[in-house]
Image (cartoon, coloured by chain):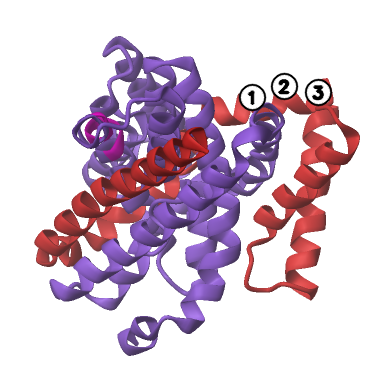
Chain colours: A purple, B red
Amino acid sequence: MTRPLPIHEIWVYLSGSPLLALILTLTAYQVGFFLYVRSNRHPLANPVAIAVLIVAVCLELLDMPYAKYFEGAQFVHFLLGTATVSLAVPIYRGLRELSGRMVPLLLALVTGGLVSIASAVGIARSLGADHAIVGAMVSKSVTAPIAMGVAERLGYSPTLTAVFAVITGILGAVLARFVLDGLGVTAWWQRGFAIGVAAHGIGTSRAFSVHPEAGTYASLAMGLHGVLGAVAIPLLAGYIPSFERMV
Amino acid sequence: MIPGLVQILLWQGAGELVSHFLLPAIPGPVLGLVLLLLFLILRGSVPETLAFVSDAFSQHLGLLFVPAATGVILFLPQLREHAWAVVSALLASVVLTVGATGLVLKGLSRKASRD
């Protein structure tokens, strides 16, 4: 004969399996994505930011340690690597369409990448941020899946890197228009590429919603910045003196 | 869909091997990306199944970094302590990066059209 399980036994059973963390992650993202679409894809209603907020509040309410949540959610996390590999497809499509402007695009990419690292690391350091925060600033303009991989290899926190990357994307998507207007950069391809270099995926989806040409160039910029960042940041990290002083 | 996924996982595996034995500074998935990109350039087109999987991933890439980004709750005290530095660095950096990239493109293409 089976007696009805007391509620806490059901809870203990459920919270011990990866299922709960997976349901939580996917539901939170689903809610975030729904709100994002409902807001006409406004960058401030970023689905990742909303999902993180929902999951964080749920963990607090359920009194569930983050490590335990991650044990279950790691199955979603694992797919980041696979998704990174699949970025080759959009990069290839972009390269095929845009071979004529390669030289100015690459020069702009290298400039943008260096300005991004130097300004973020320089400002964070001079305002007294600690080692973990400064380290996570290094790859924050690179698309989050690649940035996290790079940060991990360099011994910086992938979590802070992902958070800074998402915030950078949101800020870039909101502010880029004003900066480019102010500087008189009017051509769609130039505007799109600048947003893609600075604000990766979130900026790219913003660029697509404004103009298709801007979107194509933003997506190319994001892809190229990802590859360049992954190769150049580990090399730079050994040579910039500020990196050594930080330790 | 499955053949596309298998191909991507195989490229990821190849990237992990190259990373482990030859280039430990670069993450395996990035090397997998580069290898797949070279393959696509040599092949001259994207296999349909591969395009399908890749589009599915890029549409909801954000979902995949929710678990890691939620770890921010462990850093809240540290972030609160350095809030001013974090906000200024992120804000100024994104404005400077957009501006610098845009200006280089504008400058170079003006020069190119004058020549």
Residue stretch in magenta: A172-177
Q: Badge 1, how many Cα within 10 Å: few under 14, some, many 20+? A: some
Q: Residue at x 71, y 27 (%)?
A: B53
In the depicted structure, whether residue A207 falls above or below residue B83? above
Q: Position of residue B27 (x, y in %)?
A: 63, 62
The residue tagged with tag 1: helix, strand or loop? helix
Q: Amino acid at mark 1?
A: Asp
Mark 3 vs 1: CB contact within 8 A: no
What residue would you read off at disc 1?
B55
Q: State yes or no: discs 3 and 2 in contact (Cβ < 8 Å).
A: yes
Q: Marks 2 and 1: CB-CB under 8 Å?
A: yes
In this rendering, would B85 be left or right of A111?
A: left
Numbered mark located on residue B52 in the image: 2
Q: Are marks 2 and 1 on the same chain?
A: yes
Q: CA distance from mark 3 to mark 1?
A: 10 Å
Q: Examine the rendered structure and indicate whether residue A231 appears above or below residue A240.
A: above
Say which element carries label 3: helix
Residue B34 seen in render: yes
Looking at the rendered image, the quarter that the N terminus of chain B falls into is top right
> Which residue type does callout 3 highlight?
Thr
Residue B46 pos. (x, y %): 80, 27
Specify the amino acid type for callout 2.
Phe
Q: Which residue is mark 3?
A: B49
Residue found at x 35% / y 57%: A116
Q: Main secondary structure of the magenta part?
A: helix
In front of the other: A21 or B76: B76
- Displayed quadrant of residue A209: top left
Which label sits on residue A56? none
Q: Output the chain of dot 1.
A: B
- Describe residue B82's horizontal placement relative to residue A146 as left or right: left
